[in-house]
Image (cartoon, rainbow, N blue to C red):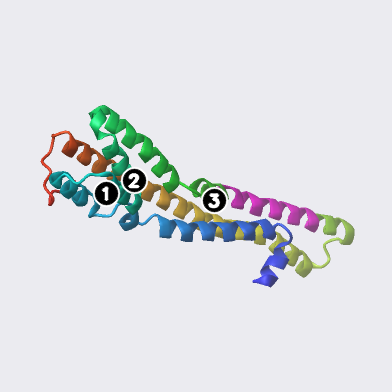
Amino acid sequence: MQDLVQSGGWMMLPILICSVVALAIVVERFWTLRPSKLAPADTVPQVQALLKRGLLNESNLVKLRDSSPLGRILATGLANARHGREIMKESIQESATGVVHELEKFLSTLGSIAAITPLLGLLGTVVGMIDVFAAIMIHGTGDAAQLAGGISQALLTTAAGLVVAIPAIFFHRFFVRRVEEITVELEQSAVHVVDLVHGDREAEPGDKA
């Protein structure tokens, strides 16, 4: 691995840094964007049970807020439920905006890495080819093996850039899709709770969104 980095020249260093950052983001997003952590299946039934028993006090709202991002959204809406349906929906939307922003954390960085690493690789190849042609001007074309080795080293950065960029593109789109799915689930759960509070649904503990 060290020999490959050295063979590719100094442009291999930023490509290597990009690969490490991309790997760290992928691991962190896999850990963070777990549906079971962000929107636990038992959150809405718990709210329904609290509504039915009349136990939506400050203490239970704090517990709900601290339980998960979905709980934070629902607790914000429930805390403003007495002000009417529209105010409750607006407070939920404001809270959801902050949650979605957290879900999208680092995704723009991952997308940027996917975009710039092929360009870094191409730049490294161009620089390497300039060196090869400079050597031809000085020493001629008598040593074909040396020329082939120089061209191979020049192309190495392009290959390295693509190796980093292709998985980065895949995971960027994968996580964007996952964020969209989780956002829809959060919205459906929030709308369900709004309907429960304002009488459009019956607060049955076993009912699901």
Q: Amino acid at mark 3?
A: Ala
Q: Secondary structure at mark 2?
A: helix
Residue 40 at what x, y percent from top left? 28, 54
Q: Nearer the viewer, residue 125 or 103?
A: 103
Q: Which residue is disc 1 drawn over?
A: 60
Res 109 label: none
Q: Judge whether residue 135 can be spotted in this image.
A: yes
The quarter in which the N terminus is drawn is: bottom right
Q: Write down the residue under mark 2.
A: 72
Q: Secondary structure at mark 1?
A: helix
Q: Nearer the viewer, residue 32 or 123?
A: 32
Residue type marked 2: Arg
Q: Which residues are magenta?
A: 115-132
Secondary structure at numbered mark 3 = helix
The residue positioned 13% from the left and 50% from the top of the image is: 205
- x and y, in percent, of residue 92 in the image: 32, 37
Q: Mark 1 or 2 closer to N-term?
A: 1
| Whole-percent x, y for residue 86 in the image | 26, 28
Q: For residue 36, which quarter of the picture?
A: bottom left
Q: In terms of sequence position, does the residue under pointer 3 or pointer 1 come before the other?
A: 1
